[in-house]
Image (cartoon, rainbow, N blue to C red):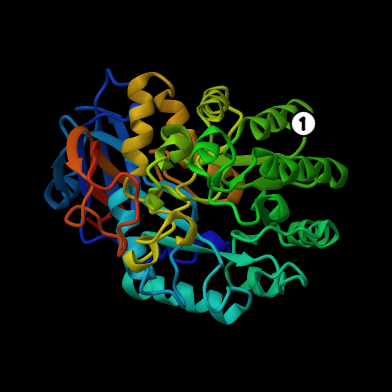
Amino acid sequence: MHPTDLHIDPADPSPSGILLTNAIIPFLGKTITRDILVRENRVVACAPTGGIELSADDASSSLRVDATGKLLFPSLIDAHTHLREPGFEYKEDIASGLHAAAYGGFGTVMAMGNTRPVNDTSSVTRYMLEKAALYHPHGPRLLPVGALTVGLKGAELAPMGELAEAGCVAFSNDGRPVTNTEIFRRAVEYAAQWGRLVIDHCEDEFLAKGAHMNEGESSARMGVKGQPTVAEALHVARDILLSEYLDLPIHLAHISCRQSVELIAFAKKRGIKITAETCPHYLALDETRLERYDASAKVSPPLRSPEDVLAVKKGVSEGLFDMFVTDHAPHAPHEKDHPLNESPNGFIGLETALPLTWGFVRQGLLSEQTLIRMWHSGPSEIFGIRINTFMPGDPADFFLFDPDMEWKVSRETLHSKSLNTPFLGQTLRGKVTAHWIGGRRII
């Protein structure tokens, strides 16, 4: 069984067919609207409006949906999410996290293993999959990311073969870097035997120890200990050299700074098997967002300098990054409502990610094709996740997006359990209005 087919049941057809008309599929061009015919969980046809001839059965049984004025996207993939269950259900649980994912346009999320207990045994992996199947039997789909080391302690490899067989699609020590390069090397080699990737949290824990933001002009003015960008870049360089030496792929998590972008450019030019992700907030915000000691913007890696933001934007526009991820990291109010030096890192992002990145398209920073690659085909190719390309036979996973709908980020509009986002109270432009997975409407 392929790990990403765990929740797909082709014997469970949608209640009826769907004929979705007058849709604009951005990466196919905005000048031609299209009709989509869905039957039995799959795309049957996609053609310019009026170009699908319906059989008598399809005409009588298909639910018609007029998508005039909306953009039609294939369901997105978030390859870096924290759903907190088991162990931290007061922050988020699998049910609420996948609910938020559905409203964000995500049909698949890869859930990191820093739960309690840590996802370092097959029993925890199976628990997560069972919870997802119970609360969201038709999606969004959860794909667990197994712990790289036992307890995420960095001292002993987790039972990676057992975790892979249970359904883990990748391995990561996310949140706690693996400083022992010998252990990390063995992890990369062993993961490759199971056809899995290692996702590395790139951070020198000694340089980063005790930091609460980026080390730079803002931290100096504020009198707050900062994390230098070299703390990230050192591990990026290590992984690049190791990937070249082993001739094996390594995936770099949540890249945030100029030096890392330059190192990734070097690696890609040499043909080294490095892939990399970044997050919308590293393009949208910089370190000055914390100058009021606002813990809602505290994240790891930290928001960097304006120069780093420009470098990450350039890296995205030049194709150096393989994907966007949200790094959705819920925390309860009693945890975030503290001084900066007492608050945990991270904020939620599943429902704000697409409006933010579509804003980059609106600004001309990204093309529609780049947006789809970063949220869809990129993670699909790297992690082996089946996707909808609107070709006959593809899974009928798609959503409608109103690019002009404005909405205020608030308790009333968010579906996550937590509200820890630096965008709380702000008005964003662009909203998912309907979402189908396997031909079933889930919102």
Identify which residue is drawn at 49% across, 57% down.
341
Residue 55 falls in which quadrant of the image? Answer: top left
In percent of width and height, residue 413 lies at 19, 52
Is 266 situated left or right of 306 in this image? Answer: right
Q: Quadrant of residue 142?
A: bottom left
Q: Nearer the viewer, residue 25 or 375?
A: 375
Viewport quadrant of the C terminus: bottom left
Residue ID at (55%, 68%): 114
Q: Quadrant of the N terminus?
A: bottom right
User: Dot 1 surroundings within 10 Å: few (below 14), some, or many (20 or more)?
Assistant: few
- Please tell me which residue is depicted at 61% across the width and 67% down the height of the picture: 146
Instruction: Answer left or right for 57 relative to 326.
Output: left
Q: Residue 245 occupies which quadrant of the picture?
A: top right
Q: Residue furthest bottom?
A: 123
Q: Is 352 located above or below residue 307 in the figure?
A: below
Say whether residue 438 is visible: no
Q: Nearer the viewer, residue 382 or 421?
A: 421
SS label for mark 1? loop
> Residue 127 in the image: x percent, y percent?
48, 79
- In the image, residue 409 lies at what x, y percent? 23, 47
Disc 1 marks which residue?
A: 271
Q: Relative to 74, say whether 173 is above or below.
A: below
320 over 241 or under it: above or below: above
Q: From the viewer's perspective, tell me whether residue 342 is left or right of residue 351.
A: right
